[in-house]
Structure formats: structure tokens, C-alpha cells
Amino acid sequence: MSQKLKVNKLLEALNEGVFEKEVAIRLSLLTSIAGESIFFLGLPGVAKSLIARRLKFAFKDAKSFEYLMNRFSTPDEVFGPISVTELQQDNYKRIVENYLPDAEIVFLDEIWKAGPAIQNTLLTVLNEKVFRNGKEEIKVKLKGLISASNELPSETDGHGDSVDALWDRFLIRLVISGVEDEGNFNSMISDDLKPTVDNVSPELKITDEEYQKWNTEIDTVKIPNEVFQVIGVIRKKIQEVNNGLADGKKEVYVSDRRWRKIIRILRTSAFLNDRKEVDLMDCFLIKDCIWTDETEIQKVEDIVADSIRSYGYSLTIDIQGTKDEIIKLKADVKKETEYQSPYETVVNKVYNKDFYKLIGFATYPQYSWIKISDFKKITTDKQTLPYHDVKGTHHTNYSTYKVGTDILVADSGWSTCSVETEKVIKKETKTKKPDIRLIKAFDAEVEQIINELEKQISIIDKHKNEKLNHLKTNLFVSKKLSEIVEENLNNAISELQDLKLDVEKIKFYYDGLE
């Protein structure tokens, strides 16, 4: 049985008797297989602890530990009491059996109420997967740690850096809400669902040997360039958001350590989907890893989706480099096929940049200048417009209208006027057929660019045909998001086809010259 088939059946079993918690369960399983931790934000009574109890059933003979933190919780209650026998021998050692260091699956509720002593010890457990017990270091069996709270860590908690450090260790952060669908709600409150009963068949449970084998193989999953490129775009967009924040607004912060853990999650997703490399669908998991405050959730979702939609695979090909080649080719063709031919023409003479002079004023020739903008208003309908002297000084308004090409102005009588003109030399762009040797050089360059574009189109087309189906069957990402990846693939192909058309137009242009 493949990993994907097994995990898919395992997820189906874990979701039995639980309503509308599919996302939480699949991400909890993903993080536990990756060896990472997950945080649930939600009000009491929305099945946060139930998810942890269900998760235990995914692993063969797994032990679990759960604890509700309060302000008075002590390390003894989480990591085990001090052994009196060992203490008598000057060895400060805990009895860890049936406590956190002895468990594969751990659920810690109201995590932020834990004191610094508990939080600091948890950091060591999560960082190094070891528990320092007196003079010994115990390699913990921890696979998955689920923490939960109905609030986010507060800067006023008084625990300072220990809270920040612990918060950074919970890689995936998820908001858990109650059952919303009415039918599901009615079943949840009335049916005998037995959600705490282990219904996972033995062949679906993950053994320790399997877990260790998977753990090694996950590290061999490749990270293709498009994934690195998308992560780079996401980081830049986050920085742009932070740069635009007003004073006092909290920045979106993603540590280097967190990015490294994100890669681990992406690799795990790819591996459990029977792939040897990460793809863009896996990248949607990033959205659940980089928010710090609820107000950021929609923002980071948009950043991740836009980065995949607008960039993705298109960043793996040098589209800008190809555009630059086409621009250079177009400039070279223009240089060799176009030239300027001078010719004489008659134009309206312009005074002081803004005025025409009307020839034919009978009474007041010194006020025969009219603004060009006013001149354009003259029609066959009679109207009144201002006239000026040569310096642009306004004299008075005259009734004016047009008859054919003549302008009639009522000064003392009606003067028939025309615009003063002048002869100027202008240049006209003409074309010529380039030398045959140049045509051969242009043809060679066109062929090279088109061949490269067709190669890239073929690669993305093949990628699309091979991977589009499994994009919609990712175990850990909603299939609706595959539309964004498909859009990115189509956009990349469309952009390359447009560039190919641009090159073909250039060739059509110089081939048609005489």
C-alpha cells in the first residue's frame, strides 16, 4: 500500500464520528509525521482535545498525555514527580512514565498559562527531542504535540522571551470553530458517535519502524526552483506589508528557523502524496505557518495565493530575459529598415507657444492673435472669443464664426481672416528592405528565440498534463486551490505564446518590406 493510499484511509478513519474538523485532523497528522507541533486557537468545547485523542489512534501502541494548564501548574504535573529514591542519592530525577516525556502524542490545553519553568523545558523537548532528567538525557518518543488556547500569547503575560520562543515552535497555527452545518450539528448532539473509540484498523496504524523510515525518506524529497521562487516572493511581499505599516502596528514576522521548518512540512506533504518533489499545491500550507495574529490570517492567505497565482512556474523560466532579447531584436530591425526622409510642408505659425495670428483684421490688426485653444473652438455657429496682442495681452472679445476655411471676425465690420502659415522642414519615416545578410542574421535570431519559447511551452504543458490531476487530490490542501495553480500554469503558457507571436510579427514585418 502506498503512503498516499494508507494516509488517505487513515484520515477517513480518524474523521469518523467527528464533524467539520477535517482540516484540523489532516494538518495534525501531517505535523506529527513531520515531527513538528501545531497550535489550535478556539473557544472551549470545539473538540480541540478530541482531535488530539483521535490523533493517537494513527500510531501503533502510541501513548498519549494531555494536561490543562493553569497559573499554578508545576513541572511535576507535566514532566513527572521527583523520585524520592533518586533524590536520596543526590540525583534530581523525575518519574516520567505516563507523563509528557513518555508520550508519543501530547495535548497541552491553555498553553499560555504555563509558567516559565514548564515553557523552558518544553522548548528543549521541541527543539532537541530530548528531556534532561537529572544526570540523564532521555530521547523522547514525541511524535506530535498539539497545544491549544482560546487566546493568543499576550505581550503582557509576563513571561517575555520564553512565550515568544515557544510560540515560534508551533509551526502550524489553526483557528478551530464549532460545527456550523445544521445537519452535522444535529447529528453531533444526538447520535452515538463514539469519537473516543479507536476505530483505526491495525494495518492502517503507523508503526515506529515505518515512522523512522518515513522520517529519513522525507529528507530526500526535492525542492524545485519554483518553490524556492514562490517562497522568495512571499518573503518580499511580507516585507512590503511591514514597510507600509503605520507606527505601532505589529509586523508579520517569520524567523529563519520557521522557514526551515516550513520546508520540512512541504517535504512531508509531498512524500505522503507519493511524490519525490514538492509542488505548488504543497506551498498553500505556508499560509497556516506564517501568521502571528488573527488579523493577519486573511492577509497572509492572500499573499500566498497571489504569489502562487502570479509567479509560480513562470519564475522558473527567464521570461524577462526573453523579453529583453525580443526588444533588442526589434530595435536592431528598426535601425536597419527605417530611415528619415525630409520634406517641406506648410503649417500654422505659432507665436509664444500658445497663439495663432489671424491675417485680415480690418480695424484692429494689432489685436489679431488668438489662443490656439480658443481657435479650436471656432465653428460655423457664431460665438464670442477673446483676442490678444503679440505679447498675449487680452484686448477684447469678438464675435467669430467659420465659413469654409475662412474665419469671420466682427471688429468694426466683418473681417474675413485666415491663419498665418509658414513653411517648415519635417522628417518622414520610411522603410527599406534590409541587406540579405542581415535578413539571414535576423532569421537565425528569430528561430533561436522561437525554439526556446516552444521548448518552455512544451515543458510547462507536459508538467500541466502530468501533474494537474494529482493537484486536485492533495491530501492536505483543498482541491479548490488547485484552480490557482492551474491558472498560474495557463498564464505562464499564455505569456510565452504572446512572446512567440511578438517575434513572428517582427519577422513578418521585415519579410514584407520592399
Image: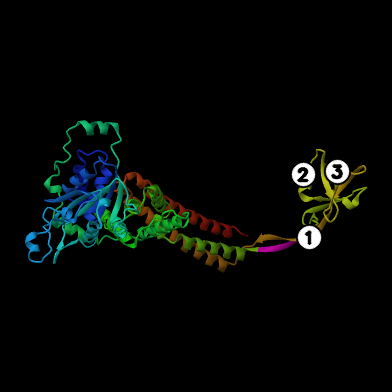
Q: Amino acid at mark 1?
A: Val
Kindly tell me whether residue 54 is visible in this rendering: yes
Instruction: Report which residue position mark 1 lands on.
Output: 424
Furthest residue toward bottom:
437
Main SS category, magenta section: strand
Q: Position of residue 323 (x, y in %)?
A: 50, 60
* Cα–Cα span, label 3 and label 2: 13 Å
Q: Residue at position x 76%, y 46% from top? A: 376
The answer to whether 347 appears left or right of 365 in the picture is left
Q: In this picture, which residue range is highlighted in magenta?
A: 339-345
Where residue 378 appears, x then y in whole percent? 79, 43
255 sits to left or right of 389: left
Which residue is nearer to you in this view: 119 or 213?
Answer: 119
395 and 376: which is toward the camera: 395
Residue 440, horizontal then vertical, whole percent: 53, 66
Q: Secondary structure at mark 2?
A: loop
Q: Amino acid at mark 3?
A: Tyr
On the rendered image, what quadrant is the C terminus found in? Answer: bottom right
Q: Which residue is mark 2?
A: 377
Relative to 109, is 462 on the left or the right?
right
268 displayed left or right of 416 = left
Q: What type is the residue that disc 2 sits on?
A: Lys
Q: Which mark is residue 398?
A: 3
First in sequence, mark 3 or 1: give its number. Answer: 3
Q: Nearer the viewer, mark 1 or mark 2?
A: 2
